[in-house]
Image (cartoon, helix red, strand yellow):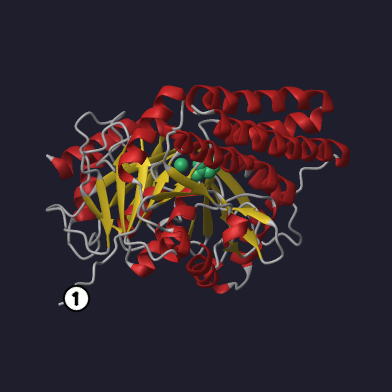
Amino acid sequence: MACVERKIMKVIKIGGGCLHGKKTIARILDIVEERAKGHIIVVSALYGITDMLINGMNMALESDENIPGIISRLKARHMLIARYLINNRKDYGDFNRDLNKNIGKLERLYYGLNFTREISPRLHDIISSFGERFSARLLTAILRSRGIKATCRMPHKIGMLTDGKFGDATADLKQTTRNFQQYINPLLKKDVILFIPGFYGVSKTGDITTFGRGGSDYSAAVAAVAAKATLLEIWKDVDGFMSADPNLVSAAKLIPVLSYSEAAELAYFGASILHPRAMEPVRRKKIKVEIKNTLNPDAPGSLITARSPRHKSIIKSVAHDTDIGILKVHASGVGARPGILSLVAGSLTDNGINIKSVVTSQTCISLLLAGSDLEVGRQALKTIAPKPYRTIETVDDLALVSIVGEGLFQKKGIAARCFTAVAKGGVNVEMISFGPSRAALYFLAKTKDLSRAVNVIHATFFS
Ligand code: ASP
Ligand code: MG
């Protein structure tokens, strides 16, 4: 009887935090060589490169004399790795030529920016996308020089299609899937390793658009859906999601299994493990996600799936985020005045401010912002005419603590246990709210109380 072998195809994402220094990169490529044949790798820029590209824009705006320095630093970082790790002439030569060509383009973009005296959103996205293009080509060349069949495809060549929103693009999953089936799937062979740069895609009109900082996780999730992969692995330099930040709580433990909602909540609030939107594409297709530690590749890590076993106390993690501020907009009858919320939110968004969350009552709209956005936000609202509110108030120096676990709201007494612990710990709660899904509850406390709050909650639910 004919036996149909089901092919398991993975998308592996390698984070920039792991691509730090030639020895680490060499070791990661050993793991790649051993485990990634027949699979797709979505790669971040080398450690620190995206920051260099972005800071470079401000320096180029200041003076064109800064440009040669920026360019030579970027080149040196990549050539250092190339010289050390590409061990045959041909692949080294090919990489060098290609890098020079692209560095030349980048240099012209920086001069263009200086000349036009403007960092347009379009230019911002083009320039910041270079790190991933460099790293994908570099890793491909290194593996090739080891005799591995590695190849690399740029997002615009394989139809990683976006909605065209600069700095915060969303992938067009339907069209990207069609494109991947056409351009990617024929390349997938059991001895081939296929690299794709993360972080950006291209719009219908051909514009390079990034998925926001940390967006390579999202790219990898999109690639997993579009290539119809069975599994998405995120390679990092930590084991996975933890029950609390180990820097604050020494008893913090690894979370072995969590649901898409739980992972998304943790990504939104606190744990800087995943891009907050990376769960959107994979949860629709129920593609499993594994967090893997490149420093400890045989460790089980954290698994993210549709169904996650409930922890006996429901709570999987207590996460936190610092540098939070609240902008309080006092007005009467908020609930009875259509339009006030969109007026306020629109004004903040127009000023480039991200609203983390909104809580409204009849007399007050409380907007959660990054602490650093608070003053800009206040000024923005002051310019709205006619004034739709009575007064504006700001509260800064806050931290956000969230408890995350599917079933949080079905099981009685969880919130009570949490806030009893917090009160016993002598921590004053500034504001309480529910997360965007049914898997999280969060509150704000003063930054000075953060460590105590997290520790008492962790002790309550995990010991
Ligand atoms: N390199 C980009 C960043 O640093 C994207 C990523 O690494 O996920 O934001
Ligand atoms: Mg990242």
User: What residue is rendered at 55% in x and 51% in y?
Assistant: 328
> Can residue 395 be seen from the camera position used here?
no
- Mark 1: give few (<14), some (14-19) or many (20+) Cα within 10 Å: few
The image shows residue 381, relative to residue 339, as above or below, that is above
Q: Quarter of the image holding residue 449?
A: top left
Identified by mark 1, the residue type is Ala
The quarter of the image holding the C terminus is top left
Q: Position of residue 302 (x, y in %)?
A: 25, 47
Q: Position of residue 28 (x, y in %)?
A: 37, 33
Q: Position of residue 331 (x, y in %)?
A: 59, 60
Q: Quarter of the image holding residue 155?
A: bottom right
Q: Which residue is mark 1?
A: 2
Q: Position of residue 84 (x, y in %)?
A: 50, 22
Mark 1: C-beta under 8 Å from nearest atom of ligand 1: no
- Judge from the rendering whether residue 340 lies leftward or rightward of residue 443; answer left or right: right
- Residue situated in front as seen by the camera: 297 or 462: 297
The quarter of the image holding the N terminus is bottom left
The image shows residue 24, relative to residue 358, as above or below, that is above
Furthest-bottom residue in view?
A: 1
- Judge from the rendering whether residue 241 lies leftward or rightward of residue 223; answer left or right: left
- Residue situated in front as seen by the camera: 207 or 79: 79
User: What residue is rendered at 47% in x and 54% in y?
Assistant: 218
- Element marked by disc 1: loop
